[in-house]
Amino acid sequence: MKSIHGNAIPYHAMFDAAFRADPFPFYDYLRREAPVVWDDVLQAWVVARAVDVEAILHNPQVFSSNRLALGRQRFADPSLVPLFDVVERLMLQMDAPNHDRLRKLTAQAFKRKAIEGYAPLVEQLTRDLLAPHANVGQMDFVDGFAVPLPVLVISAILGIPPQDRDQIKRWCDDFSIVALNFYAKITDEQLRAGQIAVADFREYLRALAADLRGRGGTDLLSTLIEAEREGERLSFDELLANAILLLNAGNETTSILLINAMYIMCTKPDVTAALRADRALIPQMIEETLRYMPPVHFIGRLVTREASLGGEVLRKGDLLMIFLGSAGRDADRYDDPDAFRLDQKKKAHVSFGTGPHVCLGLQLARLEARVAINAMLDTFSSFELASTDLKFGPNLNLRCFAHLPLVTKAA
């Protein structure tokens, strides 16, 4: 068995400062030398090649999404049980048939036709957010635009009252760190913050559900609440968990897509010039951003029975850390993978996942990014970074800059 910490492979502290600053050289090393390798610290197999990542995601019978047993074993504090009870009921933690049942309840709201119906809402919110910055000459793209836009959009779709959206965002952020990192690396402080967020959101949602029940609302939350009334289709705990999931999935990853796209436009002026000359390139720019700087870098799977992968024997109960961030830079899949190319041949990436757990909100994320990029080009004749001293946020998995200060010039 090859090990990251053995003599065959140079030691690299996964998730240390150097890794977070630039994980891609390490990904490249893994793909070439150890595409499937055991990490003693993570107590998991690290999987780096696109072909293996896709094979795992398309085989849920062998590679299960349910990793909760690991969380409950690692964090035995009884006070954390309610937190992991909610994590356990997330669609992204489930396999068929429960996953299929819950996904079906929400899928209609995220189909392409429904998403295009949200375009006027996204366009209006975008104009409202950019208007205060249009003639100022500077803005923090993160706080001023990329964070609030997706929160406002998904909150409107779900039916969250406007006055509650800032608090909802804080709860979602704290919970997301737990849901995406508990099987990799997480601090006691982050666990406690997630525990408090779940408890507070539970009480909030209970009151909101009581207010919305029976009103016949057309928002997604009202639809889920009516399903909850039928009991056997959706329990309150499932409603709670997946309302949090939808709010998280609908805001954080889209925010990161927007931030990364803007960073690329600021640091690669040839890309921005090409987009100004031909707006039809924007969809390709979005896909290339997702491949080149994906919002989510890794996901976990649990081996359900002995299997072989990349020349290694995986045992029942082993954890897999699947690096989507590495798959997007795989030279066996993409031309010149470490370069950002608007002419990259169209090949499917896995930044939204693939298989039965492919992201429900992928069309909504694409819509928001398309509208946002168009609006930035319309609003400003130029924009560039005000500082190159950029820091990454606290979530190890959702890798993006905490702030993106811009110097802008009105169009």
Image (cartoon, rainbow, N blue to C red):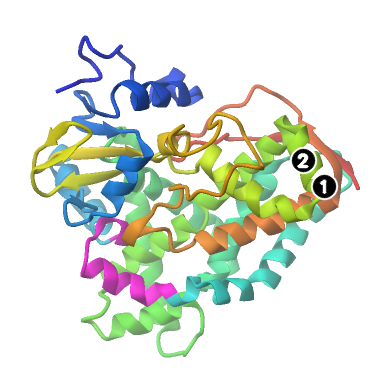
Q: Residues within 10 Å of mark 2 (few under 14, many from 20)?
A: many
Tell me the element at label 1.
helix
The numbered mark at residue 276 is 1
Which secondary structure type mostly characterizes the magenta part of the structure?
helix
Q: Residue at x 82, y 47 (%)?
A: 276
> Is 16 displayed left or right of 380 in the figure?
left
Q: Above or below — where is 98 with respect to 311? A: below
Residue lying at the far top of the rendered structure: 7
* Distance between the alpha carbons at the discs numbered 1 and 2: 6 Å
Q: Above or below — where is 224 with respect to 281? A: below
Residue 266 occupies quadrant:
top right
- Write down the region rendered in magenta: 90-107
Question: What percent of the width, then of the height, locates residue 228?
Answer: 30, 80
Residue 275 lies in the magenta stretch: no
Residue 321 occupies quadrant:
top left
Question: What percent of the width, then of the height, locates residue 169?
Answer: 51, 54
Tell me the element at label 2.
helix
Residue 98 lies in the magenta stretch: yes
- Residue labelled with disc 2: 272
Using the image as rendered, state which of residue 362 and residue 28 is in the foreground: 28
Marks 1,2: beta carbons within 8 A: yes
Using the image as rendered, state which of residue 49 and residue 385 is in the foreground: 49
> Is 89 displayed left or right of 383 in the figure?
left
Three-letter code, disc 1: Arg
Three-letter code, disc 2: Thr
